[in-house]
Image: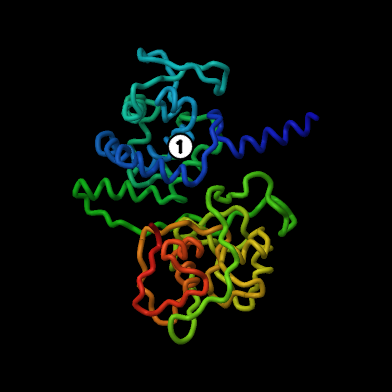
Amino acid sequence: MKKTYTILTTLLCLIFTVGLHAQYNENDIRTYIEQYQEVAIQKMTEYKIPASITLAQGIFESACGKSRLATEGNNHFGIKCHVDWNGDTILIDDDELQECFRRYPSVDESYTDHSLFLTKRQRYANLFQLDILDYPAWARTLKQDGYATNPQYADRLISLIERFNIARLDTLCLQRQGVDVPMVTYKPRNTEPTPVASKDPHAKPIGNTGKKPDIEIAPVAPKPKPANGQLKVFTAIGNDFPAGDSPFSYRKVFENNHTFFVIAQNGDTYERIAKDVQVTPENLRKFNDVLDNGQPVENEIVYIEAKAKTNNARVHEVQAGETLRYIAQRYGVQLHYILKYNTLDINSVIYPGNQILLKH
């Protein structure tokens, strides 16, 4: 019984934000970034703290604004009362039971107090000796200077910043101030996928599978019809897309439209790829809208999770040789949604020059 309790506790720690007791997913993170990125940029302008660090801390500390501390106290950075706090308070179980945390009238005031908390305390003075674009150094120094007790705190912040390309906000902030700094394309520090902790290369992962729960899986599609001439297959090389970070793949992973994919090698089959990315061949074919007996060609994109429902590109003009499946693969959109947006069915024929909607 004790062993079972220990395993359950470990899994809960992996799934839930430590001390916050609120679950969130990738969509929540993207929504949080969109909602608060301008606030983080503003605080960077005023207090010289990287917007990427502020936003990543907000995501992690508040569980994307879903924790009790955030919803009831507007506290997005886990700042405790301390002896110098004269404002409202809220009691939350954290490292100890019923600890005193600061309560704010608004989220914006939480962001401001976070900036003041770092700038006015001597213990964080080392932060402001760092390059403002060196977010890994900021994350590590925050942990070293005692901002959080979680031993993985710095790695969590860095992972969030790199996974969601938040560092672009730092560059954007400087550019708005007239600083001549280029907007570089995001390249993660480590493009190798994180291995699953198992000696069996085909073992199923424990805990969260990383799948998006709110995305439907498209039905298996019949063979599509060509627009004109030879059918196109959407292919890629590693430099075409940003690297992804899926812990359940033994292959290099890339990302298109917020969806992970791998690139098929010469002679690959869906069965072989499925073992390496730890999904079933059936689901892999569903993710990629292929026939039961279809197989990928060399350099073809193979999505390892369900594609998105829309793409912000909105409209695609059909070129010679393109099919509805090709368009679905190119833009990372589930085929049955493309059919729905365009009032088509799987047997519809498309022609060069047709406009295909990618979202409502």
**Could one spot residue 236 in this view of the protein?**
no
Residue 164 x, y percent position in the rendering: 43, 50
Circle 1 crowding by C-alpha within 10 Å: few under 14, some 14–19, many from 20: many
Horizontal and vertical percent position of residue 210: 58, 49
Locate the C terminus by quadrant: bottom left
| x and y, in percent, of residue 193 in the image | 57, 57
Q: Quadrant of residue 129?
A: top left
Tell me residue 291's x, y (percent): 62, 72
Residue type (three-letter) at the residue carrying disc 1: Cys
How many numbered marks appear?
1
Identify the residue at the far left of this view: 178
Question: Would residue 35 be found to the left or right of residue 245 on screen?
Answer: left
Is 23 above or below relative to 331?
Answer: above
Quadrant placement of the N terminus: top right
List the single residue furthest toward the right: 1
Q: Which residue is mark 1?
A: 64
Residue visible at 36% across and 44% down? 34
**Figure check: 12 above or below 226:** above
Q: Residue at x 34, y 77 (%)?
A: 353
The answer, for residue 287, to whether it is visible in the render is yes
Q: Residue at x 42, y 35 (%)?
A: 58
Along the line of sight, which residue is nearer the eye, 81 or 259?
259
**Where is residue 130, by image quadrant?**
top left
